[in-house]
Every structure is written in C-alpha cells, then in structure tokens.
C-alpha cells in the first residue's frame, strides 16, 4: 500500500483529491493538511511514502516543504501540484529534490500513475512545463544582482539592502538598475516578476 500525505489549502479540492486517490486499490491517504508548516510534522508522524504538495499554501510553500522532507525524511518522495506553469517553479522544485511536478488539471488517473512512478524511484514532470523550462535559459543576472534583487523582492528598501550586504546605497541602486536593464524590465518590481517567473530568484 502506498501511503500518501496530501497538502492542499483549498479544502474542496483536497477532499476531492483524497477521495479520488482512495479509489485506487494500492493508495491510502494517511494525512491531509492545508498549511505548509504542518507538512514536516505530519510526515514525521505518519511516515508517508510520498507527499503530494500544492505549491501555494499558507506557511511555507510546497517547494520549501519538499526541500525539508528531502533533508529530514529522504525516504518520503514528493510531487508538486500547481496551477501556475512557471518554468521557474519547476527549476525550484527540482532543486528541492521533488520527484514529480504536475499541473492541477492533470487527469486523476495520471496523478495516481505519477505517485506510483515516483514511489518506484522515477521522476514525473509535465512535458509542457519541462519544455518551457528548457527554453527559458540561464539567468543573465550576476550573482550580486541576483542577491540584491532577491532582497528587493522580499520588500527590503535600498538602505536595508545596503546594510545587509555591506554596500553603499548608491552601489545597491546601480545593481538594481543593472538588473532592470538586463531583464528588459519596466522597473524594479517588473524585474522581480520576470526573474521569479524564469526561476532566477
């Protein structure tokens, strides 16, 4: 019997997924949650074979939860579900050692098959997302530009970024300007959006 932990913050969707998976003779949903912060404690308690994780939840997101599971319970494989087909999310998920990455509109039979494949040691990635990620390419940002933009994305202002990175405010502004230019963005927040969608932050 394949033991599944299901993490999805939309209750109706979570219950529907649980019910569909329970129809499979070899799959048992042993735990459910709608909060990313509960994934690791539940996994420790129930020892699932695979965690099916929504990418966007209250608390930590599904990708962060996958990374924690890989670090603390590597025997628990992970599959990420998302409504957003951003290639950056796929890159993040793979970096977090997720074994599956599927869109939420995947057929239930496909999800069940993916769970079986992941538990068997395979990897399952939506082919369109994989192609999109390959076409996006490498980041044009330098390591320092990425660091500055990541702090800006977290809501830090120029003086705070300067203090955090031991730089002058003018240097931080120069890095932000360079990032906006390299990404052909309209402004700082547009640069953050572009970089996030491409998986460069």
Image (tube, rainbow, N blue to C red):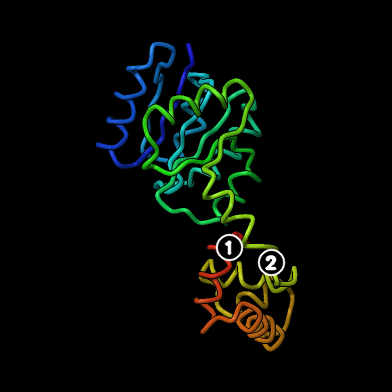
Tell me the element at label 2: loop
Q: Is residue 1 above or below residue 75?
A: above
Q: Which mark is residue 198?
A: 1
User: Callout 1 environment at 10 Å: few (<14), some (14 to 19), or many (20+)?
Assistant: many
- Residue 81 image position (x, y, % from top left): 45, 41
From this view, report whether residue 66 is shown above or below residue 175: above
Task: Please tell me how crowded label 2 is: few (under 14), some (14-19), or many (20+) other residues with Cα within 10 Å.
Answer: some
Q: Nearer the viewer, residue 49 or 99?
A: 99
Between 75 and 58, which is closer to the camera in this rendering?
75
Q: Please name the residue shown 66% across and 34% down the image.
A: 71
Residue at the location (52% across, 32% down)?
Answer: 40
State the SS at label 1.
helix
* Residue furthest left in the image: 12
Earlier in the chain: of badge 1 and badge 2, it is 2
Picture residue at 59% right of the left edge, 81% below the top: 184
User: Is 66 situated left or right of 54 in this image?
Assistant: right
Image: 53 above or below 200: above
Q: Residue at x 37, y 30 (%)?
A: 108
- Labels in figure, total: 2
Residue carrying label 2? 139
Marks 1/2: CA–CA distance: 8 Å
Report the residue that reaches farthest toward the bottom: 170
Is residue 133 rendered to the left or right of residue 111? Answer: right
* Residue 166 versus residue 69 in the image, above or below: below
Q: Are marks 1 and 2 in contact (CB under 8 Å)?
A: yes
Where residue 173 sits: x, y (%)? 64, 85
């Amino acid at each position: 019997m394949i033991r599944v932990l299901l993490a999805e913050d939309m209750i109706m969707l979570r219950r529907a997924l649980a019910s569909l998976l329970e129809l499979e003779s070899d799959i048992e949903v042993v735990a459910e949650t709608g909060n990313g912060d509960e994934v690791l404690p539940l996994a420790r308690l129930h020892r699932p074979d695979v965690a099916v994780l929504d990418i966007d939840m209250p608390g930590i997101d599904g990708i962060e939860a996958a990374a924690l599971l890989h670090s603390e319970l590597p025997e628990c494989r992970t599959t990420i579900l998302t409504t957003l087909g951003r290639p950056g999310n796929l890159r993040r998920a793979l970096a977090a050692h997720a074994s599956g990455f599927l869109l939420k509109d995947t057929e239930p039979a496909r999800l069940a098959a993916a769970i079986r494949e992941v538990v068997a040691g395979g990897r399952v990635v939506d082919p369109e997302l994989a192609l999109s990620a390959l076409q996006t390419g490498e980041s044009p940002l330098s390591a320092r530009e990425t660091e500055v933009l990541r702090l800006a994305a977290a809501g830090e202002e120029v003086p705070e970024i300067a203090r955090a990175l031991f730089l002058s405010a003018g240097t931080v502004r120069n890095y932000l300007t360079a990032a906006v230019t390299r990404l052909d963005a309209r402004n700082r927040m547009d640069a953050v959006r572009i970089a996030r969608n491409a998986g460069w932050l």
